[in-house]
Image: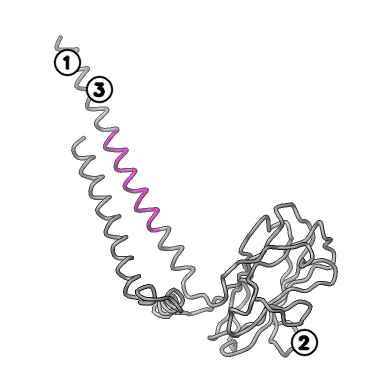
Amino acid sequence: MNENNVVKESVLLTRSTIRRVFWLIWSLLMVAGLVLILARTLALLGYEGQILNKVSPTPTIALVGGMQLGQTFVAPRAGLERIDVLMYGYRRHNSQPVTFHLRKQAADQDEVTLTFSAGQVKGWRWQSFHFPPLADSAGQAYYFFFESSASTPDDALTLGGTEGDVYPNGTAAINGHPAAADAAFRTYYSNVSLAEKLSTLAVRITDNKPFIWGDVRFYAVLSVAYVLILFLICIRIVKLAQRE
């Protein structure tokens, strides 16, 4: 009888330990997830550009033959070092090389030329282009465009974006000519402080928003509330683990 009680107590102790370890691991995963989200968010802060995408891609506007698709923009600060462009691969496997060009708007020579495989883009994808920081980019008007002379209508990419001129500092371009549209793109800069990133974010999320949605304090309160709720959830999990 005593041996049976010992066995039962041992089993209960083992189960209790497993539950506590489970809740501990669950809490750590929640914290790790929050850290990853914050790290990712901070990495994306401070970009400039136009991120709306309302285009329904058609085969007639694609990077085939001599077609060039691009966008003009003005860099607001020095140190331009990365451009992300929303591209579409028509949910198929494309195979031809595509070339990205970046030049000052009035220039004939590229500041940056990068080539990548169209196979990297399946469906919608933000394609990133990194290059050494351009020290004199502040206030400069730039033009980036893509071309892929080897691509065919069944093996080609196109760009995302929106019809109409929603981006005030540039416009989409087809074969070098302005179009009544804007590509979806993001530009990033070196040596941007966290304060500058947060300031840029505040302007971006409140611009042209009505009522409280145009007040940055509303989003600050939401952020604090979100963190507080996560903190309370973690405390609750710890208490449950202690009860076990």
Q: Which residues are magenta?
A: 19-35
Mark 1 vs mark 3, CA separation in Å: 10 Å
Mark 3 vs mark 2, CA separation in Å: 77 Å
The residue that appears at 69% across and 82% down in the rendered structure is: 143
Identify the residue position indicated by label 2 in the image: 108
Identify the residue position indicated by label 3 in the image: 11
Mark 1 or mark 3: name the one nearer the start of the chain: 1
* Magenta highlight on residue 24: yes
Colour scheme shown: one colour
- Label 1 SS: helix
The residue that appears at 32% across and 65% down in the rendered structure is: 222
Answer with the quarter of the image where residue 128 lies: bottom right
Mark 1 vs mark 2, CA separation in Å: 87 Å
* Magenta highlight on residue 14: no
Label 3 is placed on what type of residue?
Val
Q: x, y percentage for residue 22? A: 32, 38
Image position of 199 with respect to 225: above or below: below
Q: Residue furthest left?
A: 2
The residue that appears at 37% across and 48% down in the rendered structure is: 29
- Residue 5, label in figure: 1
Q: Dot 1: within a 10 Å radius of its alpha carbon, few (fewer than 14), some, or many (20 or more) residues?
A: few
Q: Quadrant of the N terminus?
A: top left
